[in-house]
Image (spheres, rainbow, N blue to C red):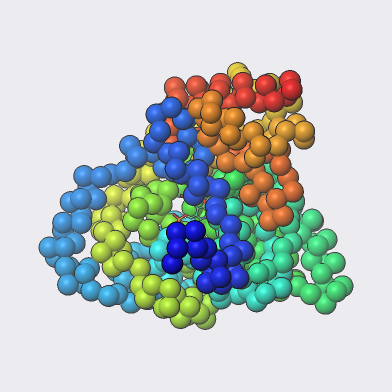
Amino acid sequence: MSKEASYGRFFSSKAVGAKASMIRELFKALGKEDIVFFAGGAPAPESFPTALVGELAEEVIRDKGNEALQYGMTLGQPELREALLEWLIRKYGFKGDDLDIIITASSQQALDLAGRVFINPGDYIAVESPTYLAALQAFRYYEPKYVMVKMDDEGLMPEDLELKLRKLREKGRSIKFLYTVPTYQNPSGVTMSESRRKELLNLASQYDFLIIEDNPYSELRYYGAPVKTVKSFDDEGRVIYFGTLSKILAPGLRIGWAVGPKEIIRKFEVMKQSLDLCTSPLNQLIAWKYISEGYLEKHIPEIIQLYRPRRNAMIKALQDFMPEGVKWTEPKGGMFAWVKLPEEINTTELLNNALSKGVAYVPGESFYPNRDITNCLRLNFTYEKEERIRLGIQRLSQVIEEALRS
Ligand code: PMP
Ligand code: G9A
């Protein structure tokens, strides 16, 4: 084929319509000395227990080499599933005899599986406004329609959801599920209050839908009391819970899980078979040792010690440098702060200028399905050290100030 030939005619219409993730594209700026990186949800490399993971990997190969290097079951390695379920029941009070767990190639795969298992083209699903960009990217493939639920500083607003559910009901429609990141949300950093968690479950019961609780961040708690999961209040088996080791051990392992009623997890299992047969048994067994030998519990406070000053440095720098009219959230945990600029500023258009001045962020519009809110941006505060965070916010403030002047 000639060099100029386009391969477009071979692509499926879904591939033609697919959009690249802004986060994945911006990852190309990661590790560049001249750019302060606030863009991805990347853990600090200093947080990785590299030597220990090396030792555990050696032990796994020595003691369980045949298991580690063989195909595994699609549901996951039994040792890891058992250790994780025990941890989740003890720590988060999950209840019910009908619980099962499947290990996934991190929670991104669980998001895709949720799309496969639940969404027919044209089905309604509800999401927070804003919501996690890569969840939208995963669901988009299955062609849902969205119900956008408003948020305030206590998380999603049940009265807004109810209003929209009622309107749908009048049309004879309903939602299949609501997707939420209720604790230290990506992207906003906001946490849903306990009373709203219960209201949400009541609505799920009343309007008959499922809830997907995606919870990568609750262990990264810098201030306040531990937050109870939505799943811990779930008496009817309506919540499917996603977790991951990405933010509390290492994303490179690609280990996550989905917990829910047995019938649903069985569907996840069948739909995962064609995706990858199984998640890497070697990585699962390393993770199993890490958890069952108590390293995870010891490591989490160390990560918090590393991240809390970074979070504080970002908030302080925002207070010191941001021009009048700019607002931001002050998250008690997680990895992100959400910044709202005056309406006239488009943060996608501003990005090139910011990159050229040495600072990267994620423009807010990708966190809304119809990309109609253009004056927000997301900042990650866990990857860079305190001095660089201050420098980066100073640079960003100057870029915004300039835009406001012109
Ligand atoms: N869900 C949310 C809310 C996230 O923030 C992330 C990572 N940024 C993921 C899922 C996916 O992470 P992973 O696939 O590494 O578990
Ligand atoms: O896409 C990734 O690398 C994971 C990070 C997600 C995020 O920045 O929210």
Q: Can residue 225 be seen in this view?
A: yes
The foreground one among 121 and 41 is 121
Q: Tell me if residue 213 can be seen.
A: no
Residue at screen point 87% across, 73% down? 170
**Residue extending furthest toward the left:** 62
Q: In this view, does 304 lie above or below 130?
A: above
Quadrant the N terminus occupies: bottom left
In percent of width and height, residue 122 lies at 71, 73
Q: Report the residue at 33% width, 37% height from top.
A: 46
Rendering quarter of residue 387: top left
Please indicate whether residue 279 sits to the left or right of residue 315 in the image: left
Instruction: Report the residue at 52% width, 63% height from top.
Output: 6
- Residue 291 against residue 103 in the figure, above or below: above
Position above or below: 9 against 43: below
340 relative to 157, above or below: above
What is the number of callouts on the image?
Answer: 0
Q: Residue at x 46, y 30 (%)?
A: 35
Q: Where residue 19 appears, x then y in whole percent?
A: 58, 57
